[in-house]
Image (cartoon, rainbow, N blue to C red):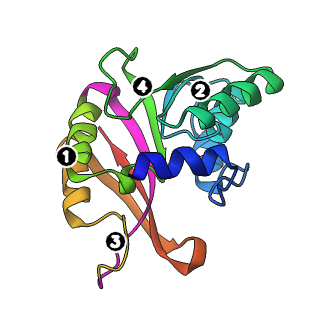
């Protein structure tokens, strides 16, 4: 159901989360690190993948919404950068050219089912280079349970199976929903 909803939202351009601006957390990371190889999980229309490529990174990016990937490819072409876009689930990563120095996830992991979160977290051990960084933005699952998705303690524990939590910064996202930026390292 979630996939169909996202497909139509991208198709109808009803994507309020897609600001077209890379967040300061990513920009700070880019400023502090030499370019390397990056993987954008749930890349949407490619804004952050393109930003990374513009700063010299070799970028691979995944999204399951075909309209989002089509838009991302057009945007990258207009920007004059090369990004390797893949139309697939973020759990289908076996053939990606790992390892990556950076795995970026802005709003994807928190929307996955628990089985998909398990597969995603398991794949991180292969995808992320030793010493590599994962930047993850997620909505937090509300204590009252009144949400269709969000990062909860179990979701975070799954990520920490192979990665070490370096930083956690809580805030609020759209509609004042509790959110978090996580920095994890392998």
- The residue lying toward the viewer, choosing from 151 and 126, is 151
Earlier residue among tags 3 and 4: 4
User: Could you give the CA–CA distance between mark 1 and mark 2, rounded to whole angstroms?
Assistant: 33 Å
* SS at badge 1: helix
Q: Position of residue 183 (x, y in %)?
A: 41, 52
| 119 lies above or below 54 | below
- Residue at the bottom extreme, as displayed: 144
Earlier residue among tags 2 and 3: 2
Earlier residue among tags 4 and 1: 4
- Of the residues tagged 1 and 3, which is closer to the observer? 1
Mark 2 neighbour class, 10 Å CA radius: few under 14, some 14 to 19, many 20 or more: some
| Start-end of magenta stretch | 126-144
Q: Main secondary structure of the magenta part?
A: strand
- The residue lying toward the viewer, choosing from 126 and 2, is 2
* SS at badge 2: loop
Residue beneath disc 4: 100
Which quadrant of the view contains residue 57? top right
* SS at badge 4: strand
Q: Position of residue 82 (x, y in %)?
A: 68, 17
- The residue lying toward the viewer, choosing from 7 and 178, is 7
Which quadrant of the view contains residue 69? top right
Q: Residue at x 71, y 55 (%)?
A: 19
Q: Magenta stretch containing residue 82, yes or no?
A: no
Earlier residue among tags 2 and 4: 2
User: Could you give the CA–CA distance between mark 2 and mark 4, rounded to whole angstroms?
Assistant: 11 Å
Q: Residue at x 35, y 54 (%)?
A: 166
Mark 1 neighbour class, 10 Å CA radius: few under 14, some 14 to 19, many 20 or more: few
Rendered image: mark on residue 115: 1
- Of the residues tagged 2 and 4, which is closer to the observer? 4
User: Could you give the CA–CA distance between mark 4 and mark 1, rounded to whole angstroms?
Assistant: 23 Å
Residue beneath disc 2: 35
* SS at badge 3: loop
């Amino acid at each position: 159901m979630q996939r169909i909803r996202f497909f139509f939202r991208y198709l109808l351009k009803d994507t309020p989360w897609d600001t077209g601006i890379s967040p300061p957390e990513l920009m700070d990371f880019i400023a502090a690190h030499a370019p390397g190889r990056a993987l954008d999980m749930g890349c949407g229309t490619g804004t952050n993948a393109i930003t990374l490529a513009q700063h010299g990174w070799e970028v691979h990016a995944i999204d399951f919404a075909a309209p989002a990937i089509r838009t991302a490819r057009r945007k990258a072409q207009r920007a004059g950068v090369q990004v390797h876009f893949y139309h697939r689930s973020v759990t289908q990563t076996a053939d990606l050219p790992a390892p990556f120095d950076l795995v970026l996830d802005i709003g994807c992991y928190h929307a996955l089912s628990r089985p998909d979160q398990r597969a995603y977290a398991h794949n991180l051990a292969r995808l992320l280079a030793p010493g590599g960084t994962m930047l993850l933005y997620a909505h937090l699952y509300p204590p009252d349970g009144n949400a269709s998705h969000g990062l909860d303690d179990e979701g975070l524990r799954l990520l920490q199976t192979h990665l070490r939590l370096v930083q956690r910064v809580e805030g609020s996202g759209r509609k004042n929903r509790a959110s978090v930026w996580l920095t994890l390292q392998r």
